Image: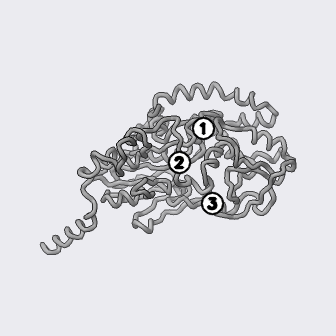
Amino acid sequence: MRIIGLLFLFILLYACKSVKPIKDDYKNKPTFELIEEEKYTKLVLSAENTPEYLPKLEGKKVGILTNQTSVIHLNDSLTHLVDFLMDQCVNLTTIFAPEHGFRGTADAGELIKDGKDTKTGLPIVSLYGSNRKPTAEQLNNLDVVIFDLQDVGARFYTYISSLHYLMEACAEQCIQVIVLDRPNPNIHVIDGPVLDMKNKSFVGMHPIPILHGMTIGEYAQMINGEKWLKDGLHADLKVIPLANYHRNTSYSLPVRPSPNLPNDQAINLYASLCLFEGTNVSVGRGTEKQFQIYGSPFIKDKAFSFIPQPNFGAKDPLHKGVPCYGENLENTEKLKQLEIKWLIDAFNSTENKTDFFNNFFIKLSGTSELKTQIELGLSEADIRASWQDGLEAFKAMRKKYLIYE
């Protein structure tokens, strides 16, 4: 028995032989070395700032809600955080996956099944299938759950809804949540109608505008502080801040955050064009210019056209195989507001206006007013004026939760 015990110990040491204990290696230095002049200027992702969170994982059973965007810069290349944590002998036992799945390849709205990560062998629990809130059984035996997803700053981008449900479920089970913060590429914009809570859904769970101008860490603090969790629950929340990040910091995402946001332009246009998902107008799904173009077969006075076909992220795109007429926005200057002029113009240019909007539009906009305002022919200026009281109240409320200047 003694020989068997020694053999087991040897195997365990061999598995981690290239990794020193967390407390020795990472308590006083980041994952990668910065040259002296960069230490106080170079943006450091929270997942890279290992001294701030690895010690909190020692001796813990750890779960993680993550996807393909959870990468760190290690040895001049991108490494997935799950792989890094496994290399550090963190006791990672469960991967939770949001909309689009762990690898980020599923279509928008496509249900995701539970599975197993082929690289690490870890079980993958889908939070976009039979349940969107982790169950007590799925959280069983976990001491802490890490949240590391790249958000884009829009209310209907469902990662913040997954954050809400994770915090709520963990609060019910007395499990800590550690949020590894990431930049918001649209942090410079706070705009749009504030959600009317009677229109609450998975694409809009909180009374916020369409563009909220917060990082995911700041947003987590707001969920807790405003008591938005069920029954006023308060999550045991720890946000690991970004280092050297400011609200005017420009950030280009190294990995597309979802299948139909392929580049910076699409990410900037996303919130404005996503409103078309509640209409009969295509936003370029089924092309290589997703969320950079829009059009429909029912708009006839536009020179630009495209034909959607099945492709990555769009197995059955709207208006598949049918010419769509609209606009190409690839070269549009970076937006500094929620742009609704294209939505208004498309409605006015559509042949049959009674079929323009569908039932999803009110969920996306968060209010029934915007649809009515467009149908009545209100000007863009008048529509924007109707948002202002809600926006000012939101800005005053969010100040309590901001981390970055």
The x and y percentages for residue 14 are 25, 68
Tag shown at residue 95 = none
- The answer, for residue 204, to whether it is visible in the render is no
Picture quadrant of residue 289? bottom right
Instruction: Indicate the secondary structure of the residue bearing disc 3.
Output: loop
Residue 253 on image: x %, y %: 53, 50
Indicate the position of residue 6 as horizontal and vertical percent values.
16, 71
Residue drawn where x is 30% and y is 52% of the image: 60
Which residue corresponds to the image point at 84% horizontal and 46% vertical from the top-left? 350
Distance Cα–Cα, label 1 vs label 3:
24 Å
Residue 30 vertical placement versus 287 (above, below):
above
The reply to whether the C-beta atoms of the residues labelled 1 and 3 are less than 8 Å apart is no
Q: Nearer the viewer, residue 208 or 135?
A: 208
Nearer to us of marks 2 and 1 is 1
Residue that badge 3 annotates: 313
Specify which label sits upstream in the sequence, 2 or 1. Answer: 2
SS class, disc 1: loop
Point out which mark residue 211 bears: 1
Is residue 182 visible in the rendered image? The answer is: yes
Residue placed under numbered mark 2 in the picture? 159
* Chosen colour scheme: one colour
Q: In whole angstroms, how far apart are the C-alphas of marks 3 and 2? A: 17 Å
Q: Is residue 193 left or right of residue 214?
A: right
| Mark nearer the viewer, 3 or 2 | 3
